[in-house]
Amino acid sequence: MKINGEHTRSIWQEQDGQTIGIIDQTLLPHRYATLQLKSCEEAAHAIKSMQTRGAPLIGAVAAYGLAMALRKDASDENLERAYRALLSTRPTAINLKWALDEIMAAVRNRPREERVAAAYKRAAEICDEDAAMSEAIGRHGLQLIEDIAKTKKPGEPVNVLTHCNAGWLATVDWGTATAPIYMAHDKGIPIHVWVDETRPRNQGASLTAFELGQHGVKHTVIPDNTGGHLMQHKMVDIAIVGTDRVTAQGDVCNKIGTYLKALAAKDNGVPFYVALPSSTIDFTVNDGVKEIPIEERAGDEVTKMTGRTAGGQIETVTITPDGSPVANYGFDVTPARLVSGLITERGIVPAERKALAAAFPDHASLKSLAKRAVG
Ligand code: MRU
């Protein structure tokens, strides 16, 4: 990912080898500032308050959070307590549990004096693996964009629609949905991205637009309700979104509003792809609508808007009548039947039980399920 032309990641280990650096995403796009996390409590707060966010990235931060907890106290009791505290920060994205379970597996059977180093080592590997998975997702997704550029739009920009932020700010590097976009752009394929604003927190308008702009990718921010109209008028060639959890049967849980885009895509014959690393697949659940816990967030995310005034001040205003109740469901589930394919690090996989199990036999195995159930 590029910030002011310089390559950087969304999470890094500071010089002391213990503190973790992240970008404070609550301040973007108006201010770029980094934060130093020194304890499990600070990591948990950063995830809960969405200073850091996006399914793969919260997994990476939580992994370091557990390592930092062990630095304070490497006992079994503290390990268990910290695991629970970090796990409770956000309920929907399965990467959080996946990453915490990876750290648990790395430290559980070790003597206390080895636990801290083992946890930091595994957390660093999780970050490197995530960046590598995103890069591989990019290579596989690039083929879809190249294909459209060659067969349907020679010489014209390929129009991609995306929802929320499944970019490098949501992962360690590259992003999931955005990785194919960056690779196409870097290869000189003309590309343009329709960026859903993604109410209520505006991850599209604030974050996806920011990172596409930093990389020089042409884009247009649209109100959330615009996608269907664009699709009817053949202004979308492909939709690519990220996900917080994919079930064994291929249902896709992602930021609220994704389902409506998938319905519109189906009705208009627009390919609807979902990009994800295997750490986002939860083989322990089948029916996403019935089984995935959907995070409900504070009402003030709906009743208030924050932005920059003409004078450069960051201000928050209220947009609803005093006393009007609001609902704030963070995610929805797109049934597998609406998904054209899953762009994974191992290639493009049909959103369907057998295909997923065949592509990821190591994740789908009983052994892996037992390991995931730990804790
Ligand atoms: O609530 P957020 O901002 O953490 O939600 C993020 C999303 O829904 C992303 O699309 C998803 O995590 C995929 S990130 C590669």
Image (tube, grey):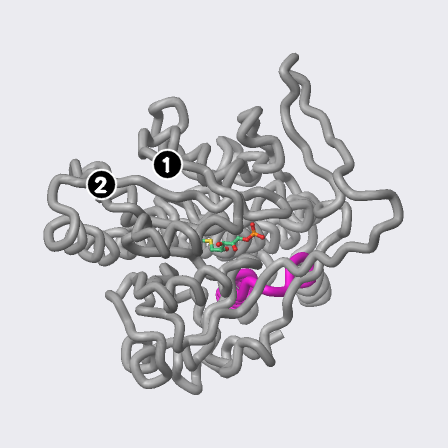
**Residue 301 image offset from top left, x and y in percent:** 71, 46
Left or right, 53 with respect to 130, comes to right
Q: Amino acid at mark 1?
A: His
Reply yes or no: does residue 95 show up in magenta. yes
Residue 20: give x, y in percent of width and height.
55, 39
Which residue is found at the position 39% from the left and 81% from the top?
A: 364
The residue wearing badge 2 is 157
User: Disc 1 vs disc 2: Cβ atoms closer than 8 Å?
Assistant: no
Please state which of residues 184 and 359 is positioned toward the viewer in this rendering. 184
Give, as a single range, the part of the protein colored magenta.
Answer: 88-106
The amino acid marked with disc number 2 is Pro
The percent coordinates of residue 84 (x first, y second) are 69, 65
Q: Secondary structure at mark 2?
A: loop
Query: Does 254 sit above or below residue 158?
Result: below
Say which quadrant the N terminus sits in.
top left
Q: What residue would you read off at disc 1?
A: 219
- Decide which of 302, 170 is in the foreground and name it: 302
